[in-house]
Amino acid sequence: MKDSRWFRRLQGALEFDTGFEIFLLLGRGALARPALTRIAEILRRFGEPRWHRLDLDGIDGLLADTQPEGVLHLVHGFERMPRDAAADLAARLNLNRDRLELLRGPVIFWIPEDFYEELLRQAPDFVDWRSQASVVPDADIGVSAEMLAKEFLRHQAQD
Amino acid sequence: MTPSDGWRRLYKVCDPKERLHIDELNLFVERSDSVARRIASSLDAGFDEQGKWVICGSVGAGKSTELTKLAELLAGSHVVVGVDLWRAAARIDEVSAAEILFCIGAAAIRTAASRFGHQVDPTLKKHLEQTFEGLLDRRHNIAVADLVEGVALLAFDLLAPGATTAAKTGLQAVRAATGSPLVPVGRPALGGLTRPVKDGDPALDALVWVVDQILVDVAQIRAPLVLVDGLDKLTKIESIRDLFATSRTLTKPQAPLVYTGPVTLMLAAEWSAVANHFDRARLTNLIVAGPTTTTRHVAPEQVSGGRAAAREIISRRCASAQLDVSTSFSVGALDLLITKSGGLTRQLLQLVREAAKLAGMDGLASIDTQTAERAADEWGKEFEITMTGIRRAELEYIEAHGEPKGGQVSHELLLWNYAIPYANGDMWFAPNPLIQLHKS
């Protein structure tokens, strides 16, 4: 992962500026959590990971009035939502994007690759604010078949 | 001070999250065919007092900045009522003409009170609520009075200073001290709230009448000028046609009105349809290269003029970051960034921002061609994400013929800036130069 182009770009951006920036990582939905976990481990020096689950909390956590400093926001959940609900949430994200500036650090969103076009349609201004949008190939995450299967089972159990 | 401090400042100054505020118009490079100045001149001269304009152009071409410029030009002679639909509507494609009128009424009440201390007749506010209630889709259970307040909070104060000013800093300090958030909470979510209505519906006519009465009340201060931003984000052709071509509702308020409209209106068929109701203004992109087809022609001085304007944009951003453009960029790097911008202002700034970041990370004293190429390459890759065979074929058609075929594919290519429109009397389109259309 560390040598991949998307990761070097992300890391470089964080080294350059740790203020509020939006990063969109596009990949397989099932890899959201393991991928972000690995990314957070490697990038820990830029901030403590702070998780946001869009499917559970919507965007409320992202829009809370008081936000901690020195954290790396990791956002996922589109992959766990029905397409209509995900599109609605994307539209809300677009509507409230200026409130995201209350977050005082970088925000990394995991976007299921097959949802990106819908995100462009529903949240064009939010996407325009990005500092980076990159596709993350499965192979870069280095997740084993076993881990993927366990992730799948965990999702099933929660549904 | 290290070189990276300067690059960091340039990185911030080119942030796409920041729209230019009225106190930052020193960064605004006026076009030779400035839409804002043309409309302002017309109104100042007493013409078009009931004029209805739609400014259309690419996303990121600077339409909102033109509105800010227009507000600046006419602030002394008009009550400038701004409506920020992109912040008021959850789904812009579902926003109806009635909702837009409602926003205009609410924003006018708010602007009169907040900027001039003028209270519009409370009866009119009540009438605004009642008439809008009569248009609501009964499936929605909405407290219209709350909606008026919510929408009014989003009245677009084009005359408000930006983040760099003492006023804004002071406001932030007060808000921090009082614990109140920087931006309004509980956003209203316009879009799809009204039942389908056609022109001539009594409830719609009543809403038009009430909005007019509010504008007449506001005119006791000065003549109102209404600027509506956000309709440039419409994504569905049906919505665009409905609002700008089929219905006349948006042209009805008795005040000069300026809307930003989507780039799709620049397509020939849509362009003609809109002419029935609106004065149309194209905010074209800077011509930084000749057309990709021999069927369209550009004079060399138009290209050099466009490139000079792009250079001026970078120069002003550099000056704002306390950098000198001539020493911060090699000639080749500046040329490459301008070419790769396609003349699209936001793309130019994104490229400069990326190049500044790369230069800062590499500890460079100036941005060289290689760094500029890397910046262009990074952003070019982002277009690959949503590239499909159909879109590539359409782009190849545009490259060969200088215009899209039309339809939803063309619309998306224009909306997402895969294709960029230009005009010099004639109109043509070209693929975004960041896209590598013909892979070796």
Image (cartoon, coloured by chain):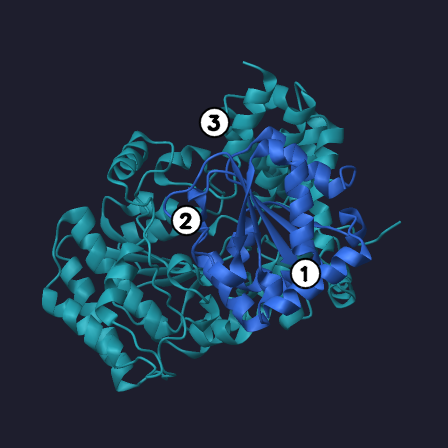
Chain colours: A blue, B cyan
Chain name for mark 2? A
Residue pictured at 62% horizontal, 43% vertical? B302
Mark 1 and mark 3 in contact (Cβ < 8 Å)?
no
Front tag of 2 and 3 = 2
Q: Position of residue B421 (x, y in %)?
A: 61, 56
> Which residue is denoted by mark 1 in the rendering?
A29
Q: CA distance from mark 2 to mark 3?
A: 26 Å
Front tag of 1 and 2 = 1
Q: Residue furthest top?
A: B1
User: Of the residues under marks 1 and 2, which one precedes in the sequence?
Assistant: 1
**Residue B281 seen in the figure:** no
Residue pictured at 70% horizontal, 30% vertical? B333
Chain name for mark 3? B
**Quarter of the image containing the N terminus of chain B?**
top right
Q: Position of residue B309 (x, y in %)?
A: 56, 37
Q: Which mark is residue B320?
A: 3
